[in-house]
Amino acid sequence: MKDDKPPTGRWKKILLIFLVLFAGVGFVGWYKLFREENEPAFANGTERFKYGSITAENNSGLPYWVWLVLPRIFPEYLPGSGGYRSLGIVWEEGHEMPVGFTKKVVGFPRVANNCAVCHAASYRTKPDEIPTVIAAGPNHTSNIQAMLRFLTRCAQDPRFNSKDIMAEINQVTKLSWLDKILYKYLIIPRTRKALLKRNQQLAWMNRPNWPEWGPGRDDPMNLTKYFLTSLPIDDSTGQADMPSIWNLKIREGTELNWDGATPAVRSVLIDSGLGLGSEHNAKFLAQIDWLEAFLKDLSPPKYPLPVDEKLAAKGKPIYDATCASCHEAGPNGQMGKVVDISKIGTDRNRLDTWTQQAADLANSTVEKLGIRRIGLQKTSGYVPPPMDGIWLRAPYLHNGSVPNMHDLLEPAERRTKIFYRGYDVYDPVNMGFDSKSEEAKLIGWRLDTSERGNGNQGHIYGTNLPVGEKAALIEYLKTR
């Protein structure tokens, strides 16, 4: 009887060929889509802080070539001309990427953000000067909301398709035939899908007639609430300035965030990293370790202009009598401790965005990720920050509603009601940034303190001082 079964050796050859092909396709797929290349060595910790990865590229990174050409295809969705520069992002000469933007190969080059996108300040002492960039300073020029809206609006446009985007990419680089196929059929469609999903996640900030953040601000606790919990969208708005995060060693053991919602430096760094899309793994926690060590010992910048030393010396006892009880640490100091809203009297909208329910749910979410950190909490007021580098931290109050120190020392009814944020030329007389000149109006963003969440009331300390003492106090504060 004839045996119809093929020889065993033939089946082994077929199986071997199949396994080789499968392994080859798998390797190519891994190499082109998932392999992770190490970043080049950074010259110093400051460069690493400004441009180094915090592992956000895989979860939330944009393909570099897509990111590069979007302003060419969709300029109408940007605030003005100049591509990404119109967003006010800090861009140092000689660097390919803006400050706070990382470029790393995870299969293919990807762009993501790190902490410096919100925490790198820039200033000029005169209009024709190259900006000085200060790592861990409060970014007062970048319009993060406009950046998020730009990316999501691009994705909603029918021109966000493989044909149109590949046509533009082909103008700036030459991809291999395999890369072209991957971009056309996989990378570009998946990028659009991810951005459309992000647009749904940000629906709460895009409601009609809703208060804008403007440059140098975000809505931090609503971002946390809607990112880490499934709570329904509510009617709260909490615009807040980007804080400085240098010299964190003096904040150990204090309440952090404007309202003291986070009681530990490490917790702030972890939650911020997760908010930027970092992966919750050992590499991410190693980055958190490095950030914590770097920021603890990073000194605040010195005031860059001449100081009247005699006048500043007169201001020291005025500071001690007027400001130190809130802004210094110690047995009798309130620095880093929550001051009840009834006492401080500033705009409470930022405080009311956060609830104990939100804190509990957010803590549960992070715990389920396998990350251990001291949890978020609900408080009843705002936290007086330390005064280190206070000269660079204008505009003032938690919502950036007071343009300069001169105004902060005036009663609320005499404070500027409308000014322009986002211009980086420094105003040494008033201790802040130019917010009223024609150039400031042209480049900056109009802040109206009558809008919900922008109130400039409260914090009346020092408002009754004589004019001469106010001037001495301001001069002293430049030395902090």
Image (spheres, rainbow, N blue to C red):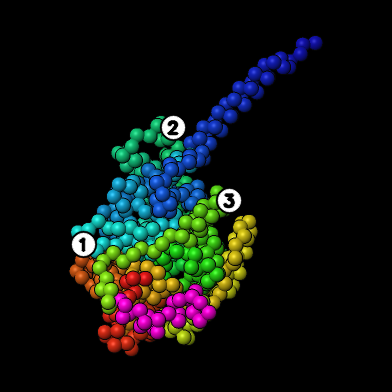
Residue type for callout 1: Pro
Label 2, label 1: how far apart the Cα atoms are: 48 Å
Residue type for callout 3: Asn
Q: Residue at the location (20% across, 66% down)?
A: 439
The quadrant of the picture occupied by the C terminus is bottom left
Queried whether the magenta region covers residue 323, the answer comes back as yes
Label 1, label 3: how far apart the Cα atoms are: 45 Å
Queried whether the magenta region covers residue 317, the answer comes back as yes
> Which x, y percent locates residue 288?
52, 55
Q: Is residue 135 visible?
A: yes
The quadrant of the picture occupied by the N terminus is top right
Kindly check if marks 2 and 1 are in contact, taking CB atoms under 8 A apart as contact.
Answer: no
Q: Nearer the viewer, residue 209 or 93?
A: 93
> Which x, y percent locates residue 225?
52, 67
Sequence order check: which comes first, mark 2 or mark 1? 1
Q: Residue at the location (42% across, 67% down)?
A: 243
Sequence order check: which comes first, mark 1 or mark 3? 1
Q: Range of the magenta residues?
A: 312-336
> Which x, y percent locates residue 68?
35, 46
Q: Residue at the location (20% across, 70% down)?
A: 437
Residue 169 placement, left or right of 3: left
Q: What mark, if any, has residue 178 been given in the picture? A: 2
Residue, disc 1 = 127
Residue, disc 3 = 281
Kindly check if marks 3 and 2 are in contact, taking CB atoms under 8 A apart as contact.
Answer: no
